[in-house]
Amino acid sequence: MSTESQASPPLPPPFNNTTPPPTLLAQGAEARLYKTTYLTPSIPAALKIRPSKPYRHVILDRRLTKQRILHEARCLARLRREGVPVPAVLALDWEGPLNTATGERSVGAWLLMEWIEGPSVRAVLEKWEAWVKRASTEREQRGETFTVSAEEDARVIDLMARIGQAVGHMHRVGIVHGDLTTSNLILRPLPGSPPGQVEESSDADKEPPSLEGEIVLIDFGLAMQSVHEEDRAVDLYVLERAIGSTHPRTERYFSEVLQAYRQSFKGASTVLRRLEEVRMRGRKRSMIG
């Protein structure tokens, strides 16, 4: 659904008076994400707004909104200090503007972050799988058998290893993501990469997309600080299920994520053992319904 056809939700100052105005990218139950600028029109930034909830008591709403926006910012700052590839925090307001006429705050809190260029891992893997499907169909029409080449195998394995390393680094710092899907992993072009190396293309199924770039973790709205093996294992399980359901042709490479994760920090082996228990519980829930 086009966001242009909907009534524009309120923006907090100074973003309600910028040229061009922020572009709404996504709108969920808890937050809205915009693309805007920082300091100058040439510096892009990501703006996350947590609106007030009119159904909650005013004091409770302000307290919860403040806690959640501050917690996300602290997680990002901690990961950034430890060298984990995440967006930098640029600015933050946990109070929101006050409507002097009503005494209410229509916008609860906002967080301004570094804009990460590059496609999501989800988009890249979808393009890679579309290319595999097209190549396989063309071979079958000619009566030939299609197999992914060793070179393509190596490219996907390398991408999965980078994902495992990034997740392992995050867990080593003591942060659990909470919503670890391929949509929340960005493939940022490496410095000096040719323009468009990892950009999306309308005819991506004609040739395999680039898989080069740095894995950047985004959207820490559900993140928490934890060093418990159970929490880390659930994080990995969510990623495994996301890849299995969204990228079926790539699912067989998930072991490469776990192999790189195992090498990322000292406690990884214990987490992977707990992952087996989490998988068993997930299969039981699936059978029971």
Image (tube, rainbow, N blue to C red):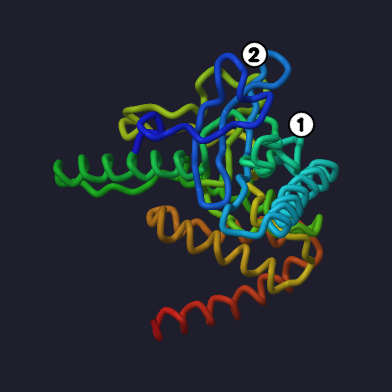
On the image, the x and y values in percent for residue 48 come to 63, 39
Q: In the image, is residue 227 above or below residue 140?
A: below
Q: Is residue 7 visible?
A: yes
In the rendered view, tell whether residue 289 sits above or below residue 20: below
Residue 176 located left or right of residue 241: right
Is residue 86 left or right of 152 when viewed as pictured? Answer: right
Identify the residue at horizontal 63%, vertical 40% (top origin).
107
Residue at x-position 20% and y-position 40%: 138
- State the residue in front, 141 or 245: 245
Q: Which mark is residue 104?
A: none
Of the numbered discs 2 and 1, the one sitting upstream in the chain is 2
| Image x and y of residue 185, in percent | 58, 44
Badge 2 crowding class, 10 Å Cα cut-off, few under 14, some 14 to 19, many 20 or more, is few
The residue sitting at 44% across, 61% down in the picture is: 244
Q: Amino acid at mark 1?
A: Leu
Q: Secondary structure at mark 1?
A: strand
Quarter of the image with the C terminus is bottom left
Name the residue that disc number 1 marks.
90
**Dividing the picture into quarters, in which one does residue 234 lie?**
bottom right
Q: Residue at x 58, y 77 (%)?
A: 278
Q: Identify residue for label 2.
A: 42
Asked if 67 appears above or below 289 in the picture, the reply is above
Residue 32 location, x and y as percent?
Answer: 55, 41
Q: Residues within 10 Å of mark 1 (few under 14, many from 20)?
A: some
Quadrant in which the N terminus appears:
top left
Secondary-structure class at tag 2: strand
Question: Which of 6/2 is in front?
Answer: 6
Towards the viewer: 35 or 132: 35
Indicate the position of residue 227 as horizontal and vertical percent values.
79, 67
Q: CA distance from mark 2 to mark 1?
A: 15 Å
Amino acid type, mark 2: Ser
